[in-house]
Image: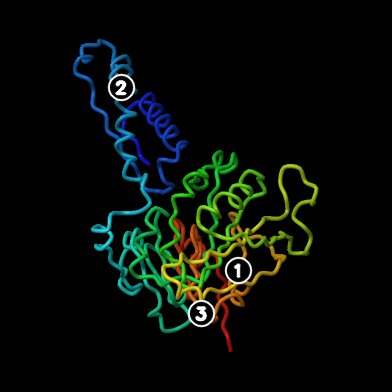
Amino acid sequence: RRVHGENHFHDLICEIAYNIFNSEGIISQDNKEHIIETKQNNSKSSLSSPEEEEENCLDLSSVLLKWSELVKTFSKFETPENEENQNSIIDLSEITNMTELFDQPILTNKIINSHSTLDIGGHKFYIPKGGGFLMSDISNLYKIKQFAPKFEAIIIDPPYENKSAKRRRAYSTMSLSSLKKIRLSPYITETGTYLFVWVTNNPTFIEFVQNDLFKHWGAQYLGFWVWYKVTNSLQLVLPLNSVHRKPYEILLCGFIQPKKKDESLSSILVSPIFSQKVIISVPGPHSRKPSLQDLIAPLLTKPNSPVLELFARNLTPNWWSVGNEVIKFQHSQYFIEEEIN
């Protein structure tokens, strides 16, 4: 966000206003710049001191009101049907500048080889074949509804609120209540969809996702997988009994049965298959999670069945991915080029 103003007092008020609304889950997590302009109250223009004039021209209630009006547009996770029908989708080959990457679904299934190279803005990205992506705030998930298929699996890596993320401001976070605004029902197949949600080791988050969020999304809880983080020498990155941080993360697993519209659907409903798994890998940069493609594949009806990943920071062949940083790890700096004989 960018706040227009010439003095620190103005910026401070706007920062307070932002935090108030963000704590209530009103502002969705996105990286767009929000602009607030406040006008000087003419009745106070007779002050002799410029410092006093700047300090008194701002009215806290008016700034809060402006924030309230501004964030109303970000408090909904679905757009009216008449607006939804105006969405469009573009092919990767049609992109000519960086701005075209944002806020609109991009199709990648026309890529002929295993991947395509996107050179744009002085940066090179490797885009895998199949599926598509939306580089945008999660509140714009509805934009893929017209174009994407139903998904046999959905993976979610929520940006939970925590002190570390808040202190470093490395990424925007979401409150637990905001996660319940994400609608998954439009993307569930007729035979059901597997659901995978990453959680931190905070007991509050684990309990919320397992007992509240899964229920909200109509998901049956199946169990969990554990990801152990190791060094290149296959040693745990931290002791198991470490107090503040743990060398593992948990992936909660569930299954969403579709809502029955008629009894004829009951014959095609399936019983989910589940077995406990332990994942061992060297962690990537910036809390990057290990790839689940090979682990999920046996659960799908066919190897290339559609999968949806939310809050994604990289692309997977044949998957649809949505997130603010959805092509972050597709940048050439994260790849090693090798010639294959």
Q: Residue furthest front?
A: 263
Query: Residue 226: x, y in percent?
Result: 70, 60
Which of pointers 2 and 1 indicates the residue nearer the eye? 1
Q: Residue furthest left?
A: 42
**Quarter that holds the N terminus:** top left
**Which amino acid is tagged 3?**
Asn
Whole-number angstrom distance, CA of label 2 to CA of label 3: 57 Å
How many badges with numbers are in the image? 3
Left or right: where 80 falls relative to 182: left
Q: Do the residues labelled 2 and 3 touch (CB within 8 Å)?
A: no
**Quarter that holds the C terminus:** bottom right
Which structural element holds mark 1? loop
Left or right: where 276 falls relative to 149: right
**Which amino acid is tagged 2?**
Leu
Whole-number angstrom distance, CA of label 2 to CA of label 1: 51 Å
Q: Which of marks 2 and 1 is nearer the N terminus?
A: 2
> Residue 292 bears which disc, if any?
1
Residue at image x 30%, y 16%?
56
Residue holding disc 2: 58
> Residue 304 bears which disc, if any?
3
- Near-viewer residue (184 or 170): 184
> Residue 239 bears which disc, if any?
none
Q: Earlier in the sequence, mark 3 or mark 1?
A: 1
Residue at image x 58%, y 54%?
286
Which structural element holds mark 3? loop
Query: Residue 109: x, y in percent?
Result: 40, 78
